[in-house]
Image (cartoon, grey):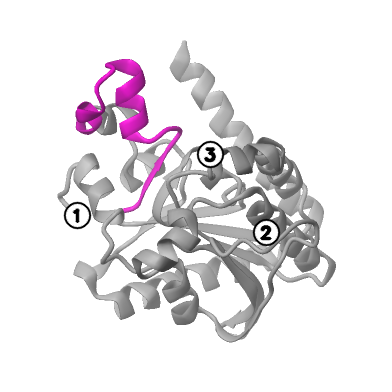
Amino acid sequence: MSGLTAYERLKTVRSPARPNGEKYVRALFSDRVGLCGDRRFAEDPAIVSGIGYIDGIAVTYIAVDRGEDIDARMKKHFGCPMPEGYRKALRLMKQAEKFHRPVVCLVDTMGAFCGADGEERGQGQAIAENLFEMMGLKTPIVSVIIGEGGSGGALALAAADRVYMLENAVYSVISPDGCASILWRDAGRAHDAAECLHITAEDMVKLGIAEGVVSEHGGDFDKMCGELKSTVFSELRALLKLPVDKLLEARYERFRRIGVFGEESAE
């Protein structure tokens, strides 16, 4: 595993040179058909979604995409989805449930878009609705944190049966920058906040929030995607064998255990 500190990993996943969500989609899923729009307001380019195959299993894929260049990043709000993005994701999850397709989510976001436009269109409600519906979705869900998993914007695509993280990925309730600004009124102490928040992939496994860590193989994208595809495929095969009632019960218990652990830690 990487010997980087938590803050160094954060800087790594924020690097413009890091592969974006759409590149992972192209590498992991074959015979893809892209699907757009939330059927309520608009299409959100920050979320790339559709139907494809992963080693013969038909899946619905949903990926947060930051964009490859500055123009694309601005169009995609640097990977911060709007409410219509989350509603599009939910629409496709419900479609997957109808046709008994598992769902694979690839998460890389600093958080949901926090501008006035997002609030006017119901950002909080969109996130809450995703969380509620995902907990009862009658089809397997596997989520992978491929970069930054920030706050509710990430959790709205990670209320899954299995959660995996790439080696340098991070997952936190608030960004270290925001945490430092609130706690110490000094965003320059983000490195201290990153350590206090326990945001690394290894931390998430220890806390029971993630099932495992996928090696990045020293930056070899093809090797990393090969291991990631194998991991996701194995989990999907196992989850698809479960009766729906057992699947939902296990998903509930998974998050219940996380909640109980948090209560005990607070005490």
Calculate the distance from the C-alpha at mark 2 to the C-alpha at mark 1: 32 Å
Residue 178 belongs to the span the image colors magenta? yes
Q: Amino acid at mark 1?
A: Ser
Q: Kindly tell me whether residue 21 is visible in this rendering.
A: yes
Calculate the distance from the C-alpha at mark 3 to the C-alpha at mark 1: 32 Å
The image shows residue 170 at horizontal and vertical percentages of 35, 46
Q: Amino acid at mark 3?
A: Cys
Would you name the residue on which mark 3 appears? 114
| Residue 39, label in figure | none
Vertical position of residue 247 compared to residue 18: above or below: above
What residue is at 57 percent from the left and 49 percent from the top?
A: 158
Which callout, 3 or 1, points at the residue further toward the start of the chain? 1
Q: Which residues are magenta?
A: 168-191
Would you name the residue on which mark 1 appears? 2
Which callout, 2 or 1, points at the residue further toward the start of the chain? 1
Q: Secondary structure at mark 3?
A: loop
| Residue 89, label in figure | 2
What residue is at 19 percent from the left and 68 percent from the top?
A: 218
Pointers 3 and 2 in contact (C-beta within 8 Å):
no
What residue is at 79 percent from the left and 70 percent from the top?
A: 100
Q: Amino acid at mark 2?
A: Ala
